[in-house]
Amino acid sequence: MDKVRSQPDSALGHARQMLDRGTLPPAGIVNPAVAQSWQRCLGAGLQPFSHYAGADPVSGACLAQAVERRRDLLLRARPVMDYLYAQTEGAGGMVILADDHGVVIDALGDADFLERADRVALRAGASWHEDHRGTNAIGTALAEAAPVVVHGGEHFFEQNRFLSCTAAPVIGPEGDVLGVIDISGPHRGPHPHSVALVRTAGHMIENQLFEARYGDALRLRLHSRAEGLGTLGEGLVALSEAGRIVAANRAGLALLGLELADIGRVRIEEALSLRLAAIQDYGRRRPGGVVSASGADGRSLFLRIEPGRRMVPRPNRAPSFEPVRDALSELDTGDERMARAVERARKVASKPIPLLLQGESGVGKELFATAIHAVGPRRNQPIVAVNCSALPEHLIEAELFGYAPGAFTGARRDGSPGRIREAHGGTLFLDEIGDMPLALQTRLLRVLQERQVVPLGGGKPTSVDFALIAASHRPLKAEVEAGRFRADLYYRLNGLTLVLPPLRERSDLAVLVTRMLDSFAPDIGLRLEPDVAAAFAAYRWPGNLRELANVLRFACALIDSGEDIVGWDHLPEDFVEDLRRPQAAPVGDEIAMATLRAASDSLIDRMVAASGGNLSEAARRLGISRNTLYRRINGRR
């Protein structure tokens, strides 16, 4: 939503008097975006009559680095800035381009106003982030991720009250904020069309960036009217070879009923009535032709399909591009290592290959094994789980292989088929197989080789057919070398080994927390208090997913009606003590940070990297808003 509403001077004057005394005015007195910005500034310790924090412009070398970092943006923006300046020339103002940190990287304007602006460092190299310049159009547009007008006394600092500024963020095709385009002028009044001008300028830059980056991709141009195609208001969408929306402008997202966070996540068939195969086929036969379709909400749309130079080879048959939604895909919550394990497991789930799951206790090996069974050809048959470390040694043999009537004292009168026979037709999951005694390892190996089981106490061999998944928190290869595990059994089990990462090394903690909270307390929308979330990120989670689930289940039990924030008081006392205790970690472990804040910053950096720099996707994985993520990143600079 645009944050552009202005207030009468009388109301603003009253609000200024309160702000100058260090208090916030009541709601409704000033523009909500300005009021929120004032609150952020006071919260950051800024004072309206104080000197700027960090007011000095960056060095020439740093400015050159900032320009180089956003060279693509500057290249596309400069012609638009020239156009924008031509619309306001003579009004005594300037046009400014700032990067996503609020640093001015280009500016042009009337000479007399440029001299006045230079007195408050409104020039190239200066940071106009809110933390440095208080409430201002550039910094506040970044914080709000929306167009903003900051007029006269709405500026936080006294020195800037002679300005009237209007700014709009520039959003990249992948959904991340690249910078801000701004019109600034004297306080006598903003240009009557300044909001429309900066919004239009922002859209022009965004469209040029889209064309420059995705000119070779399969593209769709969208509009609700056929004659709207080719105009500034058209929607632009780029598709991957699998039909995923990998880039779009804001008009395209609006026409498809999508949000910025949906870029990279949604397939075109989920938002449009046309299938990918039909889009590709039409693009080949009539490149640039117009076709009608409807969006997911039933809205009629007109499309121009441009195949680009990266089309998928024409398939022999129409493929299905429905997203995979099964038990394995549910385990892929954004962590790269887990995603790789899921992908490999899916490839062998239908093949007669034994799987060995390795990982610390509590990482979810049984859950993973259950998911593999659920997507395989034996899904309608039982999965039988045996925890080899939970059974007394003298009972494991009877539990696994069964026993004949009267085989031993205390045996059931009619005997027992054993867990292996119960798994016939389905899947046998042997958890913690590294704890199985050597003598039983020999018997199990024989069963795996002969596919027959003989019950304890004698009897007729029974043929068995099952898929085998084994798991252990012990590194079985090392156990073999130490003589504690049979090498021939290890190689029989090790058709494919998947190592599940410990929770402390996963990048999807926030997603896991959200899912668990939603599972334990549906329809509440629980979330962690920021300090608790930072502590979770710093904690080493020795119990992994099992420990996390227990903690969150406990917290949900303590949540009172009407509460939606999990705070320190909702956590088990012994766990809180562990959270606040310095976390020991191996040398070089990036999570072993000196403070909770540093650990949280590390998590953010890793999530941004894992998302390929897409801040919208990183915010989704972290379970926070993109504005919050943006403020956290820039607050460290």
Image (cartoon, rainbow, N blue to C red):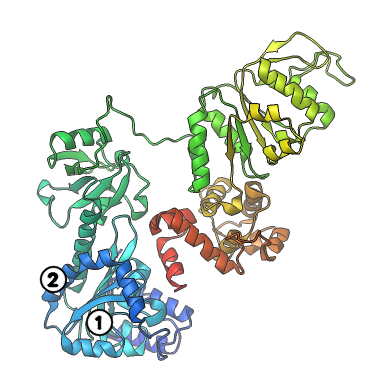
The relative height of residue 239 versus residue 91 in the rendered view (above or below) is: above
Q: Amino acid at mark 2?
A: Tyr
* Kind of residue at badge 1: Ser
Give the Cα distance between marks 2 and 1: 20 Å
* Foreground residue among 413 and 398: 398
Binning the other alpha carbons within 10 Å of mark 2 as few (below 14), some (14 to 19) or many (20 upward) gives: some
- Dot 1: element: strand
> Where, by quadrant of the figure, is residue 288 drawn?
top left
For residue 142, what is the image quadrant? bottom left
- Is 304 on the left or on the right of 633, as rendered? left
| Residue located 62% across and 44% down the image | 363
* Nearer mark to the viewer, of 2 and 1: 2
Q: Residue at the far right: name it.
A: 409
Which quarter of the figure is the N terminus placed in?
Answer: bottom left
Task: Tell me what residue is drawn at x 21 percent, y 43 percent.
Answer: 309
Secondary element under disc 2, as helix, strand or loop, is helix
Residue 395 placement, left or right of 345: right
* Vertical order, 134 against 324 (above or below): below
**Residue 164: which numbered mark, if any?**
1
Q: Quadrant of the C terminus?
A: bottom left
Residue 471: percent from left, percent from top: 66, 35
The x, y position of residue 134, in whole percent, is 38, 81
The residue under label 2 is 83
For the question of whether residue 31 can be seen, the reply is no
Q: Classify residue 568 by image quadrant.
A: bottom right
